[in-house]
Amino acid sequence: MAKTKKNESIEKMEKLVSLLKRRGFIFQSSEIYGGLSAAYDYGPLGVELKNNIKKAWWKMFVADRPDMVGMDAAIIMHPKVWEASGHISNFSDPLVDCKKCKRRYRADHLLSADSLSPEYDKAKAPELKDVKCPECGGDLTDSRNFNLMFKTHMGPVEDEGSEVYLRPETAGGMFVNFKNVVDTMRMRVPFGMGQIGKAFRNEITTENFIFRMREFEQLEVEYFINPKDWKKHFEEWLNIMDNWCALIGLKKENYEKVEIKGDDRAFYSKRTVDFEYKYPFGQKELYGLAYRTDYDLTQHAKFSGQDMDYTDPVTREKYIPHVIEPSLGVDRSVLACLVEAYTEIEGGRSTTTDAIKDMEVVLKLPYALAPVKVAILPLSKKETLTPLARKIQKDLTSSFACMYDETSSIGKRYRRQDEIGTPFCITVDFDSLEDNAVTVRDRDTMEQERIEISKLEGYITEKLK
Ligand code: ATP
């Protein structure tokens, strides 16, 4: 039977998830205890990829910009922060339970699902009362709001006064430090703060691997502006986010910028654009860009009693700065970038023997993000080659992330490196002992070049640019 596009996408996702486990990128959290749902651990190669994404973001959004500074605020903040921001009263999703099997769903997800079972009349807008439990067909309860914040207690006494929250987003830590940054860094509006860090949400439903987790990581900017310039800044950030998508290898046709209409926007936002990526499991949010007006600083001024006014040092104009917020998820970046990079080659690329004519997988990650940049592969395990190969590894390790592999055939080793996205493989052979040169193989073109060992570092640096 011919495969449908949907089945193919599901299959692709399954193959990717299995590759990521097999090759040490991402594991289910607490797997030996049966796993914890919606929590994942980044393994040795996954953490390198993730760190490379974070480093690239920090460089592009913070370090390379004179109008940006960094921040690393605490995860647990004063509970009033979340009262001021509206999270305690509003940060909730609509929850419904199945009366029969007790499964829980997000009502908005149920209404937008295109694979509901049993089906309802899709010609008219669906209403919750028409929808049954997709698993068992049972009746659903009315929808009620479920707050997504994780609560815990601080200090030895567990009473109401010791209740604190794990932050549901990193933004709060930047708003509460607005005054500190203006005063200590002499920043002049427009300027921004960037922060990378964990956020926690007790999501009602979790789904699709690392797409929706209860513990995840964010890359956020709070950019403080004079309100008269908001349209210009919003357009600039849209462009920057497009450049970022290109940097992590996303093709323009694989994501869409969706203008969020009035009622669907947060009440304080004047404009929100979601970047939606075409994941194998459907088109879903990757990032968001929002013009948050002066909501945040005004709320914190009100709840803290502190003055959040800003006076321009040149024009003496006094106002509460407005905020443009590009909010990105680290894990969704990792996922989109992996989906994009995952390439299957039917029949394989190595045509030398029939044995290796089956399907090959190449992870075409952008060079800057690849967890390993260079693999050093002595042609055979013979002792005569090992000292030279190890020396090359030692010399290159301070410049590039290297991996040494001398097990199994050279063909198999190339394929292992292709599967983890290593851009360059260096083969040390018996001629290398005579001519002081090695063969460098390119992951994408498979071209092989003979390079003098003394010129290797410069050659690879040039190629990686
Ligand atoms: P969604 O509609 O998918 O729940 P959201 O609109 O609530 O997402 P934001 O509050 O805008 O998300 O968070 C900013 C970014 O943080 C998102 O664009 C996404 O990249 C990331 N993010 C949010 N929730 C999660 C999660 N549960 N798991 C992984 N990443 C997340």
Image: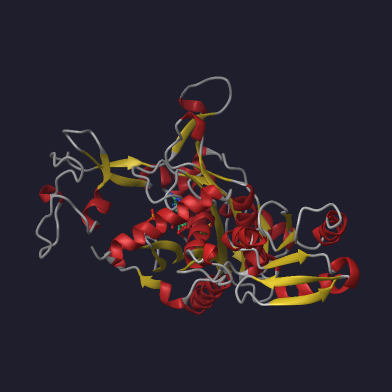
Question: Which quarter of the frame holds ligand 1?
Answer: bottom left
With 263 as the anchor, is 166 left or right in this view?
A: right
Q: Is residue 234 visible?
A: yes
User: Which residue lies most toward the top here?
Assistant: 157
Taking depth in this image into account, of 237 and 19 the one nearest to the observer is: 19
Against 155, residue 348 (above or below) is below
Against 339, residue 441 (above or below) is below
Taking depth in this image into account, of 371 and 195 the one nearest to the observer is: 371
Against 182, residue 39 (above or below) is above
Q: Describe the colour scheme in one phrase.
A: secondary structure
Measuring from the top left, give residue 453's x and y in whole percent. Answer: 86, 70
Measuring from the top left, give residue 119's x and y in whole percent. Answer: 13, 54
Identify the residue shown where x is 23% and y is 33%: 102
With 8 as the anchor, is 398 left or right in this view?
A: right
Residue 455 in which image quadrant: bottom right
Taking depth in this image into account, of 235 and 398 the one nearest to the observer is: 398
Against 165, residue 276 (above or below) is below
Q: Is residue 292 visible?
A: no
Q: Quadrant of the N terminus?
A: bottom left
Measuring from the top left, give residue 234's x and y in whole percent. Answer: 49, 74
With 51 as the anchor, is 431 left or right in this view?
A: right
Q: How many marks?
A: 0
Q: Quadrant of the C terminus?
A: bottom right
Measuring from the top left, give residue 121's x and y in whole percent. Answer: 9, 59
Identify the residue shown where x is 75% and y is 65%: 427
